[in-house]
Amino acid sequence: MSHLKLTEVFKDYGQVRVLKHINLDIRSGEFMVFVGPSGCGKSTLLRTIAGLETITDGTLEIDGEVVNDRAPSKRGIAMVFQSYALYPHMSVFDNMAYALKLQGLSKSEIQTKVEAAGEQLQLTPYLKRLPGQLSGGQRQRVAIGRAIVRDPKVFLFDEPLSNLDAALRVATRLQIAKLHQSMERSTMIYVTHDQVEAMTLADRICVLRDGMIEQVGTPGELYESPNSLFVAGFIGSPKMNILDGEYAAKFGAETVGLRAEHIGVGTGDKAISGKVIHTENLGSDSYIYVDTGKEEPLVVRQSGMQSYKPDEAISVVPQPGMIYRFDKSGQPIGRG
Ligand code: ADP
Ligand code: MG
């Protein structure tokens, strides 16, 4: 069990302020996901929690104790990186056993723990192999196994799946979800730029922007009630359609956001007309990209397969009540 609390945490690299006013409670057993644009400070925040970076100002507490000055190895934390960082000349077994040997565990204790982790991650047939004889997905599972055997209170993951191809990403994502279910006492903090990973794995998502926390909430809360235009545009795939000018003025807003699934074919005074650029048929549903004369195409979702032709004229309307309205400063002012 491990509860983390960050209070007014700042991190500077020399003159550069990378993290600002970080206030965050991560509950025991929670799966917290950090998302945000590249360079916003996700890895720095994770490394600060791990103790790989010092905290410039503020406090980090684990289970009520301030651990700012506690060595990384004494924090009960295990970290899994994007690059697997395995020892190439050690077998899978020895890679997982290494930290346990350093801790002075007996041979039989090590054997039990490594075999259990191998079982859990479906690595049993590969324990004698070298990392070079494994696929990327298997290597990442070894890296996760190395973290599991230490029985940490907190797991930190920094974009662990981003080096894997699409199919392996899905499979390994499911394994991480199962891991969380089976280790319900462990707190997990997971950095990703992948929308699907964030939405499917997280109990709560923390959106970072320029070193500050923009919003923290469940995937559903962020998706349905973004507290800024930034979060609205960042959470969800495809991205929310953002319109301004005269069209937004029809709803008494500076900017409006329309999700692809809330737009249908139709006419009327709230209609948007344009030309079809391209249709993505996914089988179960289709995404129609519409040129409305703006820089960004409007994305409209329709169910089933669609057979629009490029350049075909189309008129679409948003579903009443599902128009996200924002003021000049990007603050939400309710739906229209
Ligand atoms: P993210 O993981 O969200 O992409 P990072 O936490 O890696 O972002 O980086 C946040 C900012 O801090 C970036 O502007 C980056 O250039 C800067 N930064 C990261 N590490 C260092 C460092 N060791 N020294 C100086 N600047 C750094
Ligand atoms: Mg990073």
Image (cartoon, helix red, strand yellow):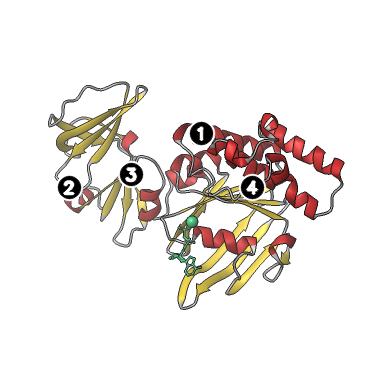
Q: Mark 4 belongs to which amino acid?
A: Glu
Q: Work out whether mark 4 precedes mark 2 in sequence or the reverse, and give the earlier one.
A: 4
- Residue 45 picture location, percent across and down: 55, 61
Label 1, label 3: how far apart the Cα atoms are: 27 Å
> What kind of residue is marked 1?
Leu
Sort mark 2 into few (<14), some (14-19) or many (20+) by Cα contacts within 10 Å: few
- Residue wearing tag 4: 30
The answer to whether mark 3 is within 8 Å of ligand 1 is no
Q: Earlier in the sequence, mark 3 or mark 2?
A: 3
Taking the spot 35% from the left edge, 22% from the top edge, the residue there is 283
Left or right: 254 in relation to 184 = left
Above-or-below relation of 294 to 263: below
* Residue 43 or residue 177, whichever sits in front: 43
User: Mark 1 or 3, which is nearer the eye?
Assistant: 1
Residue underneath mark 3: 240
Q: Residue at x 16, y 26 (%)?
A: 309
Which one is closest to the eye, mark 4 or mark 1? Answer: 1
CA gap, disc 3 to disc 2? 15 Å
Name the kind of residue labelled 2 in the image.
Lys
| Badge 2 element | loop
2 vs 1, front mark: 1
Residue ranking furthest to the front: 89
Residue at x 48%, y 44% (from the top left corner): 162
Query: Which residue, given by chain and number where applicable, does mark 1 sit on?
Result: 168
Q: Earlier in the sequence, mark 3 or mark 4?
A: 4
| Secondary structure under the numbered disc 4 in the rendered image | loop
Residue 83 drawn at (x, y percent): 54, 49
Q: Residue furthest bottom?
A: 15
